[in-house]
Image (spheres, rainbow, N blue to C red):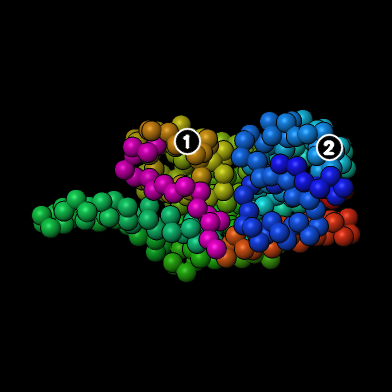
Amino acid sequence: MSGNSARPALLLALDVPDAFRARLSTLYDVLGPYDAKFEDAVAALPRRDAGRVAVIVAYGTTRTTPAVIDALPALGLVCCVGSGYEGVDLDAARARGIAVANSVGANASAVADLAVGLLIASVRGIAAGDAFVRRGDWARGHRPDDRRGLTGRKVGVYGLGAIGLKIAQRCEAFETEVAYHGRTPHAGTRYPFHASLLDLAHWADVLMIAVRAGPENRHAVDARVLGALGSDGHVVNITRGSVIDEASLVRALADGTIAGAGLDVFEHEPSVPEALRALPNVVLTPHLGGAADEAQDAMREATWRNVEAFATRGGVAQPVHAR
């Protein structure tokens, strides 16, 4: 879709509400959104449009590759909606002097809420209980087995960023112990720090995954980590599917290495393996973490602040790295 060839352009890689698009249009000629594979969509842009694109607005998972960057000679900002940015080739952006921004914390409360909801659903068997009632088993005089609750559990949070901290605070309200692992200890936090993820898993019987995804932690939650959680252990993932070795998770759930899991993200979403969907001890949701009205509003507002700062002052409000 071509626009006003006299103005610099902003390239949308996702759908946004009409009102937000109109707001962005006060600063840039807005092109898109492009539902096709983003790299292919950029390659297919008319030259007159590709030469005007100053800003990309995309999800952090959108592949903003060296080929995308090379095809947009006027590009100055890649603005990620949400806290993730793993789809952006940061080395290629830095080499071109392109700023990369995100919206850390904008959806943290909503994602933390879902994380704790998945934890409760997994520990207390809520989905299985719902199916039990719907089948009529309760009316036939049956009852599900008792389960251990949350009180007294040891909750390990992998990644104590904006989302991880809110998860930790919420879990404390359920009378749990909380500790964490991340790249470095956080000054000022009262939660104990574990120097390795494996050590955290040995201590914990719940693992809440809230770490930002990247090549350095792909499949960090592997068979050894799952085994360390133990047969009463539960794992919850609301960050990115790549952090868990999905094949190892399926095996651990199937053979009783761990008791259960709550998953909002998957390695190749929206495709979810049949072996995972067939398991009775996993609760699955379709990447709903940030899909709350207030979270969406906050992420759009954070995106606007980044784009407006770039358009008017050449900087960004929340840089992953600046120009």
Real-space CA distance between mark 1 and mark 2, rounded to the nearest whole angstrom: 36 Å
Of the pair 288 and 257, the residue shown nearer to us: 288
Q: In terms of depth relative to the viewer, which is nearer, 211 or 38?
A: 38
- Residue 57 drawn at (x, y percent): 72, 48
234 left or right, relative to 180:
left
Circle nearer the viewer, 1 or 2: 2
Q: Is residue 316 magenta?
A: no
Q: Residue furthest bottom?
A: 173
Residue position for label 1: 271
Amino acid type, label 1: Ser
- Mark 1 or mark 2, earlier in chain: 2
Residue 178 vertical position relative to residue 85 in the rendered view, above or below: below
| Place of residue 275 in the rendered image (x, y in percent of width and height, measured from the top left) | 37, 33
Which residue does the image show at 87% across and 47% down from the upper left? 6
Task: Give the magenta range.
Answer: 276-293
Q: Label 1, secondary structure: give it.
A: loop
Query: Few, some or many C-alpha atoms within 10 Å of disc 2 (few <14, some 14-19, many ≥20)?
Result: few
Crowdedness of circle 1 by 10 Å Cα count: few (<14), some, many (20+)? few
Magenta segment includes 285: yes
Q: Which secondary structure dominates the residues rendered in magenta?
A: loop
At a point 43% along the width and 59% down the height, the residue shown is 117
* Rendered position, 183 above or below 224: below
**What mark, if any, has residue 94 been given in the picture?**
none
Q: Quadrant of the N terminus?
A: top right
Q: Which residue is mark 2?
A: 48
Q: Residue, x 43% and y 33% (percent of image)?
A: 273
* Residue 83 in view of the camera: no
Based on the displayed image, in which of its 4 quarters is residue 230 positioned? top left
Q: Is residue 48 left or right of residue 137?
A: right
